[in-house]
């Protein structure tokens, strides 16, 4: 474990929200292969200590997967694009979905995709992810399939991601999750900082910008984020510099 660094107090003014895949960990062909480096976990633990626990993970993954990837750090988190939320004191809330509808959606997805090489379905509690990283040419066909299925279930919506189409309960996104957590201790009254890499993170960037916070996108592509990192490794260096007072968040807010 890194020794607890000295700091100038700026971390006590901010709340930190991190996406995981493509942000704290490089993207992989299979989600099970994703890992956050142990040194980065140690830095996040230090950041959580310095910010009195105001560090949260906001991911498309369900909460149990978030906890597995970030162990032993277990704090506030939003999973399944905000359909699951856990506050720092352990309170849980989230979307409910009709089990019969979930079963029907799963059966229809399987019927249409079982014969498609490189395409696989991930069940995520009240949501589904249709992955096609190993079959990129299937993007449009899969979109048509997924949208046609969801059209029969108004309580659900389709969301695009990096080589994935997701089916999730309507009315939830990462921005709403961040906004909710900002109303709970120890996030109340702080300035939000959110780092993500995907179109699913844009709702989070939007909320953070509305609150005059710091939004950072990793990688290329249009974005509402006010700052940009070229790659995941740049985020790692940024966290280290933040812990060692080599950067000032107030300066980033003024850009």
Image (spheres, rainbow, N blue to C red):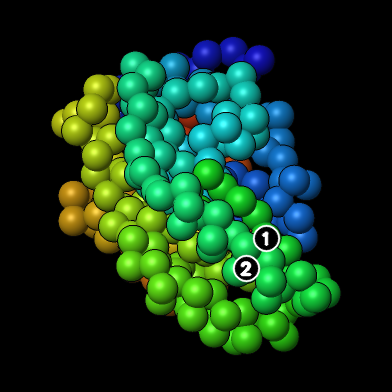
Q: Residue at x 78, y 47 (%)?
A: 33
Label 1: few (<14), some or many (≥20) within 10 Å?
some
Determine which residue is flagged by label 2: 109
> Residue 121 got which mark?
1
Furthest residue in direction front, as rendered: 100
Q: Earlier in the sequence, mark 2 or mark 1?
A: 2
Q: Residue at x 61, y 79 (%)?
A: 142
Q: Is residue 83 above or below residue 14?
A: below
User: Residue 23's x, y, as percent?
Assistant: 57, 51
What kind of element bears circle 2? Answer: helix
| Residue 253 appears in view | no
| Residue 155 appears in view | yes
Quarter assignment of residue 227 = bottom left
Marks 2 and 1 in Cβ contact (< 8 Å): yes
User: Residue 163's x, y, as percent?
Assistant: 64, 70
Q: Is residue 227 above or below residue 194?
A: below
What kind of element bears circle 1? Answer: strand
- Figure label count: 2
Which sits in the foreground, 118 or 88? Answer: 118
Q: Residue at x 29, y 57 (%)?
A: 171
Calculate the distance from the C-alpha at mark 2 to the C-alpha at mark 1: 8 Å
Label 2: few (<14), some or many (≥20) within 10 Å?
some
Residue 4 relative to residue 31: left or right: left
User: Residue 161's x, y, as percent?
Assistant: 54, 67
């Amino acid at each position: 474990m890194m020794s607890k660094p000295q700091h100038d107090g700026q971390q006590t003014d901010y709340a930190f929200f991190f996406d995981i895949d493509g942000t704290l960990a490089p993207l992989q062909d299979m989600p099970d292969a994703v890992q956050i480096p142990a040194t980065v976990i140690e830095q996040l633990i230090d950041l959580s200590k310095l910010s009195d626990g105001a560090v949260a993970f906001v991911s498309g993954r369900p909460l149990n997967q978030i906890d597995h990837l970030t162990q032993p750090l277990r704090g506030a988190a939003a999973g399944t694009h905000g359909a699951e939320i856990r506050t720092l004191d352990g309170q849980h809330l989230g979307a409910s979905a009709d089990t019969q509808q979930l079963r029907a959606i799963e059966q229809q997805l399987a019927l249409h995709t079982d014969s498609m090489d490189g395409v696989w379905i991930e069940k995520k509690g009240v949501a589904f992810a249709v992955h096609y990283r190993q079959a990129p040419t299937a993007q449009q066909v899969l979109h048509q399939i997924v949208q046609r299925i969801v059209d029969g279930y108004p309580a659900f919506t389709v969301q695009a991601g990096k080589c994935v189409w997701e089916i999730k309960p309507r009315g939830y996104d990462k921005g709403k999750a961040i906004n909710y957590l900002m109303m709970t201790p120890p996030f109340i009254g702080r300035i939000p900082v959110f780092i993500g890499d995907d179109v699913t993170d844009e709702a989070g960037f939007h909320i953070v910008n509305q609150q005059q916070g710091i939004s950072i996108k990793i990688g290329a592509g249009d974005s509402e984020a006010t700052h940009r990192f070229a790659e995941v490794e740049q985020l790692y260096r940024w966290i280290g510099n933040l812990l060692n007072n080599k950067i000032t968040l107030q300066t980033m807010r003024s850009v």
